[in-house]
Each structure stands twice: as C-alpha cells, then as structure tokens.
C-alpha cells in the first residue's frame, strides 16, 4: 500500500471520527458553561438597522484592515482567505467532485466549479505534458466568464501560497525582533501545514515531478496533510473556520443589537 | 507565592467563565489586526491588544487545557511567578477597555475583557495600584466622602447647585421620577457638570432627586480593578437606592464606565433586570426636545466637534443622538478626521488609568485631602505608565488639532480631563466641555 492508498482508503474514517469527537468536545464546553441570566433592556432599533448591523459585523474586520493594516488585508484576508483557501477548498473542480462524492447534494455547485487553469480544464502551461487538444490557448468556458483568468486553480493556489508564506514569514520578526509572546510554535506549525497542503496539491495537479509514482506520492501527501489538518481542526486555531468565526461574529452582532450601536 | 496559591487564585478568577469569554480565550488566530487600533500600541507594539490578552490566555491554558497542563510553555501555557508581575502589570494597565479591538477583530474577540481578567489576577496577588484600591475601598465603605476635605468639596458643589437653582435641592426625595446619579469622580474632574445637570432638571420642572452624597466613586470600581464581588456589591447598593426612591429613570451625566456598566452589564451581574430606565443626559435631553418640552437655540461658537466616549458610542450605541443635538445649535459642526462613532479613537485614559498615573494620584490626594502612600513596585512602574499615558492622549490631541475645532463637546468626565490635559501638554488651542455645559444656555423651556 502506498501513501496515496493509505491516505485515501485507510485514513478517511479515523480522520472523520477524530474530527467529530473533537468537535463534540469543543462545542460541549461552550454548552456546559452556558448559564441563563437576566438581560438588559435592548435599545430600540429598526429591523433594517439590525440587518445592517449583522452585515457590518461580518465586514468590520475587512474595513478595518483596509483602513489601517493594508498588508494584513492583502495577504491575510484577500490572498489567503478570500481569493485563496476558501474558493480553492470549496469550488476547485477537483474538490467539488470530492465533496459531491461524500455529500451528493454538493453537486449542485458543479456549475460554479473553478477549473485548474484558465486555458485548460485539465492541465496548465507549466505542466510537463502538452495539452491534449489543439485549443490549448482557448479559454475554458466556465460560468465565471472572463473572471476565469483569475478564478482558476493555478492562480488561486499561487496567491494562497504567497499569502500563507507571507503570514508565516511575518511571524519571524514579530517573534524575534518584537518579542511578542502571542506568537507561538503552533502558529508556525499551522501555517507550515497549510503551506504543505497547498504545495503538494499544486504539484499533484501539475504532475510534478513527472511519473505516476510521484503523482501518487504528491496526491497522497496532499490528502494525508489535509486529513491531519481536519483531525487537528477542533484543537487548533483552524477551529475558527468551522466555529470560532461564526460564533464570534454572530455574538458580536447580537451584542451590537442589544446596545443599539 | 506558592504555586498552589496561584492555582487557587486562577481558579477563582476563572470560576465565572461563560461561553463568550471562552471564545475570547480560545479563538484568537493571532492576526494582529487589532494592533493599529489600540490607543496604547503607540507606547510599544508589545501593548497591542492581542499580546496583552495573551498573558491571560497563557494562564488560562496552564490551568484549563489538557495541552497546557501537559506541554506547558511549548503551547504557550504558564502560571505567573513573582518575576512576571511587573510585566503583567504593564500589560494590564495599558488598556482602557475602549472596545476598539473588539470592533475590528475578525473573530469578534474582546481582548479588553481578558485584560480585565488579568487585572483580577493581579488584584489577588496585590498588584493593583494603591490609588485604585483606595477608590474601590471607599466605594464599598459606608460613604465615599470618607475624608473631611472630600465632604467639604462635595458640600461646595451642592452649594453651587443650590445657587444655580435658587433654592434647596430635592435630595433623597422618595417618589421622584428621575434619580440623578452624580459620581464622586465627576466632583473631582468636572464639578460644573453636576451643577449644570441639576440646573437642567430644575429648569424643565422635572420631578427629580439625587443622593445627598455620591453612591460611588466611578462605579463599579470592581470592574476597573477586576474584583467581581465588589462590582456586585456596589450594583446592589445603587439598585437598592433607586428602588427605595421608586424612580422611573436613573440619569447619569457620566458617559463612561458607570453608564455602560449600569445600562448593559448590571442585569447580568445582579441577575435581575432593573425596573427603571438608565439614561445618559444626552438621551434625556433628546427626549425633552422630541417631546416638545424644550427648544434648542442656535448660537455661533466657532468650529465644534463631538468626541465619542468609547463606552457611550461603541459600548452603548449613542452615536447619532449627541450629534443631532449639537447640529441643532451650530452650523459649524465637523466630525473628527480619524473616525467617528464605532471608529472613534479613544482619549487614552479611561477605565481607571487616569488615577493610576502619578498626576492622577496627586489630583485625587488633593481632592480627598489625604496622602495615599504607595508600594515599592509602584515607584518603579508608575513613571513609565505616565509616559505611555501621555503618548496615548497625544494621538487624540493631534486628531482634534487636525480637525481645527475650538470646542470639543463630549459626554464623559474622564474624556474631558484627558483631552484638556492633552491640550495643555501639547499646545492644543481647544477646550473640551461636557454636552450639558455646552447646551445649557441654548435650551429654552417651551
């Protein structure tokens, strides 16, 4: 059994089990700490105002980063999250197929799938193989139209790799020169893991290095690292992706509603 | 201090943990987006909110997480030791709880709340500034007017208020509709505001009363020093006083900690929703205008701006109301350039910091007519705190200078003190006044 088989066929169930157990553990801590208390009188505001506040709660950080921390906006929010990991994870055509296999209703998103490349749905200009059609320079016809120039696996993966690398390197001076105690080993480990997933996925997609063994090794590495991330997810900062972000923003909106901000 | 004692202290601090605080403790991704928004980052990047909150997270991990107990420092978990106290003090007292970090955090984390938890730990190891501990003590005692000098000063203010209304004041009068609650901190920093508010209540013929002596210094001081029990005790006392009067409304001219805490936190702490409304004088005035009881007349005062006190705007949602009132009396109003309302930059000295600085202490000692004494560590840590506080208020002063406003209207005595102190220190040609002082001579009773 090679790494690919191990990752795809042996590790899937344990990964899912650990993830679910971790999730239950984390969420139960929140549930057990809940205590019903008296509430202050809410400030009166219109329904429209409350809807605006709900939306605002989700965009405040984006606005705040654009105003005073443009580097964080470009690297952390835009490259890493908005253009990188989120569309890649949920809309890259390969991933849409994967999600649909385990969760068939996900197939509804197939029309929105992002191709690997703007010029070929299978390979790319950097692939070691020649395109199999003579239409290699034609744009792939997706629902995204001209946006496919950016919304394709090649470009998004590179942007995500740049964003992740920057966030990783940024932590070195923050730790060494600024002596910030909030920079921890786990921060480096999480970003290195993410970088490993992105790079191995990119290499596998491009059949680099050439040869079936390498392809299986790269894809196996990609899947295995992704499984490691899923297993660690409930116990690390990645938890913000499934819970922390949503809980935090909804609580913020609730708090602002109450105060009538 | 033995490790077991520290563990007991930490357990006590964490005993009130709720899901929201758990989220604050566990969900940070260390993105650092809060850094440019904290008024104290200017004093050093180590004072960015997330790095200050990390000190409390380390303690939490060491005591409450499996990874922290097993792996300790490797996962950023450690209990404080004697040698850490100076650093922890610096971190805990470079925060004004202005809620800006909460506002901009992508995860909705309020680092300021964790800094207050850190103050709670420090309080239990004896590292609360003597001045704040003193204020907490007098707030919990029989009377905040604990010295002869303080009593004289309070009587002077009441005397001025009597002159302003031309008669006696309805002190502690049961059955009054409005219970005006001036705090001792206002007597120290902005006594005229108390007089102006009394005059307003008298002018409009309100059924009102006020306590014959303040019910607290800047309640709850327990929030400021991080003592949950004293916070509960003072809230109970205030709630019971208003209950005895039978008032429908508690009216505050202090738009900082006391207003936000009474309006939005008190029900959680005492686990009871009060049977009266809590209003800042801005809201009260707007109700009078909307109800047609008073009219505001225009008068030229040069360029006027409104400084949003963090706890009145971000903390309590009073953003447009004061602007509507000011715009009604002047045509030359302009917002501050760095941001307004939710994005207002803090004055830099709230949540007790003013009285933790050397100058603030002197002011307090002078008012109370009493020397406070201090611990050895305070001599070491107070001067740098003073320097950093001055750097923090300079940012606000620079912003006001940029706005080119001659009058800065606001609604919190601490903001007024800090802004005026900053103007004196950094050559700002403006004066900060309370909104009630600014509007009083422009109010016509209909």
Image: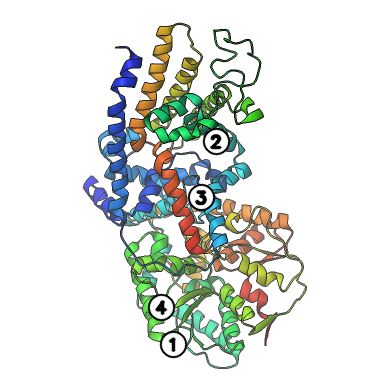
- Circle 1 or circle 4, nearest the eye: 4
A61 relative to A150, above or below: below
Q: Which of the two marks, 2 or 4, is nearer to us in this view?
A: 2
Report, in whole angstroms, how far the alpha carbon at label 4 lies from the one at label 3.
33 Å
Q: Which mark is residue B101?
A: 3
Name the residue nearer the viewer: A166 or B82: A166
Q: Are marks 4 and 3 in contact (CB under 8 Å)?
A: no
The C terminus of chain B, quarter of image: bottom right
In the depicted structure, whether residue A45 falls above or below residue B200:
above
* Residue depth check, mark 1 versus mark 3: number of the one nearer the observer: 3
Q: Which residue is mark 2?
A: A82
Cα separation, mark 1 vs mark 2, equals 59 Å
Identify the residue at image location x=67%, y=74%: B438
- Vertical order, A187 against B329 (above or below): above
Q: Secondary structure at mark 3?
A: helix
Are the residues under badges 4 and 3 in a single subunit?
Answer: yes
Asked if residue A58 lies left or right of residue A231, the reply is right
Tag 4 residue: B275
Dot 2 lies on which element?
Answer: helix
Which is more toward the observer, A13 or B251? A13
Q: Earlier in the sequence, mark 1 or mark 4?
A: 1
Q: Where does label 1 land, which residue?
A: B172
Q: Nearer the viewer, residue B318 or B134?
A: B318
Locate residue B105, reporting x and y percent: 50, 47
* Camera-side mark, 2 or 3: 2
């Amino acid at each position: 059994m090679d790494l690919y088989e191990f990752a795809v066929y042996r590790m899937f169930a344990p990964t899912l089990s650990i993830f679910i157990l971790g999730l239950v553990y984390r969420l139960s801590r929140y549930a057990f700490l809940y205590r019903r208390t008296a509430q202050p009188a809410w400030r009166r505001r219109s329904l429209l105002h409350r809807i605006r506040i709900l939306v605002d709660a989700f965009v405040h950080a984006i606005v705040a980063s654009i105003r005073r921390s443009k580097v964080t906006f470009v690297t952390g929010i835009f490259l890493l999250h908005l253009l990188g990991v989120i569309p890649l994870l949920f809309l890259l055509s390969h991933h849409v197929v994967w999600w649909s296999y385990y969760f068939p209703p996900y197939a509804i998103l197939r029309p929105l799938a992002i191709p690997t490349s703007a010029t070929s749905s299978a390979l790319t200009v950097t692939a070691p193989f020649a395109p199999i059609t003579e239409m290699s320079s034609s744009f792939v016809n997706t629902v995204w139209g001209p946006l496919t120039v950016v919304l394709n696996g090649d470009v998004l993966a590179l942007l995500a790799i740049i964003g992740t690398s920057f966030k990783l390197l940024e932590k070195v001076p923050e730790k060494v020169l600024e002596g910030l105690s909030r920079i921890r080993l786990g921060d480096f480990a999480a970003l290195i893991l993410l970088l490993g997933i992105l790079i191995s996925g990119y290499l596998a997609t491009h059949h680099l290095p050439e040869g079936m063994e390498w392809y299986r090794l790269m894809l196996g590495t990609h899947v295995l690292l992704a499984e490691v991330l899923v297993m660690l997810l409930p116990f690390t900062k990645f938890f913000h992706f499934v819970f922390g972000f949503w809980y935090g923003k909804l609580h913020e909106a609730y708090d602002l509603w109450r105060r009538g901000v | 201090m033995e490790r077991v004692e520290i563990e007991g202290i930490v357990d006590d601090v964490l005993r009130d943990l709720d899901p929201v605080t758990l989220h604050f403790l566990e969900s940070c991704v260390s993105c650092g987006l809060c850094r440019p928004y904290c008024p104290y980052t200017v004093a050093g990047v180590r004072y960015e909110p997330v790095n200050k909150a990390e000190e409390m997270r380390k303690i939490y991990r060491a005591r409450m997480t499996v990874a922290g107990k097993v792996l300790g420092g490797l996962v950023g978990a450690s209990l404080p030791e004697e040698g850490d106290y100076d650093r922890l003090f610096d971190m805990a007292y470079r925060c004004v709880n202005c809620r800006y970090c909460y506002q901009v955090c992508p995860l909705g984390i309020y680092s300021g709340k964790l800094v207050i938890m850190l103050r709670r730990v420090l309080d239990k190891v004896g590292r609360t500034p003597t001045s704040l501990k003193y204020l907490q003590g007098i707030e919990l005692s029989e009377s905040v007017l604990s010295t002869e000098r303080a009593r004289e000063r309070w009587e002077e203010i009441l005397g001025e208020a009597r002159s302003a209304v031309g008669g006696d004041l309805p002190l502690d009068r049961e059955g009054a509709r409005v219970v005006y609650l001036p705090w001792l901190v206002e007597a120290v920093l902005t006594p005229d505001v108390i007089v102006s508010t009394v005059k307003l209540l008298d002018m409009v013929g309100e059924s009102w009363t006020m306590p014959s002596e303040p019910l607290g210094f800047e309640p709850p001081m327990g929030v400021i020093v991080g003592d949950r029990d004293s916070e509960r005790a003072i809230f109970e006392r205030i709630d019971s006083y208003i209950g005895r009067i039978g008032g429908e409304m508690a009216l505050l001219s202090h738009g900082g900690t006391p207003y936000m805490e009474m309006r939005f936190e008190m029900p959680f702490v005492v686990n009871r929703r009060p049977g009266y409304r809590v209003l800042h004088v801005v809201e009260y005035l707007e109700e009078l205008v909307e109800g047609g009881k008073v009219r505001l007349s225009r008068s030229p005062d040069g360029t006027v701006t409104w400084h949003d006190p963090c706890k009145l705007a971000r903390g309590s949602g009073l953003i447009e109301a004061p602007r509507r009132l000011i715009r009604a009396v002047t045509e030359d109003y302009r917002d501050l350039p760095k941001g307004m309302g939710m994005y207002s930059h803090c004055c830099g000295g709230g949540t007790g910091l003013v009285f933790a600085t050397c100058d603030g202490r002197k002011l307090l000692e002078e008012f109370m007519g009493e020397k406070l004494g201090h611990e050895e560590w305070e001599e070491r840590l107070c001067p740098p705190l003073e320097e950093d506080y001055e750097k923090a208020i300079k940012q606000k002063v620079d912003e006001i200078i940029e706005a080119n406003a001659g009058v800065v209207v606001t609604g919190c005595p601490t903001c007024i003190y800090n802004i005026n102190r900053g103007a004196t220190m950094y050559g700002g040609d403006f004066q900060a006044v309370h909104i009630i002082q600014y509007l009083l001579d422009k109010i016509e009773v209909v």
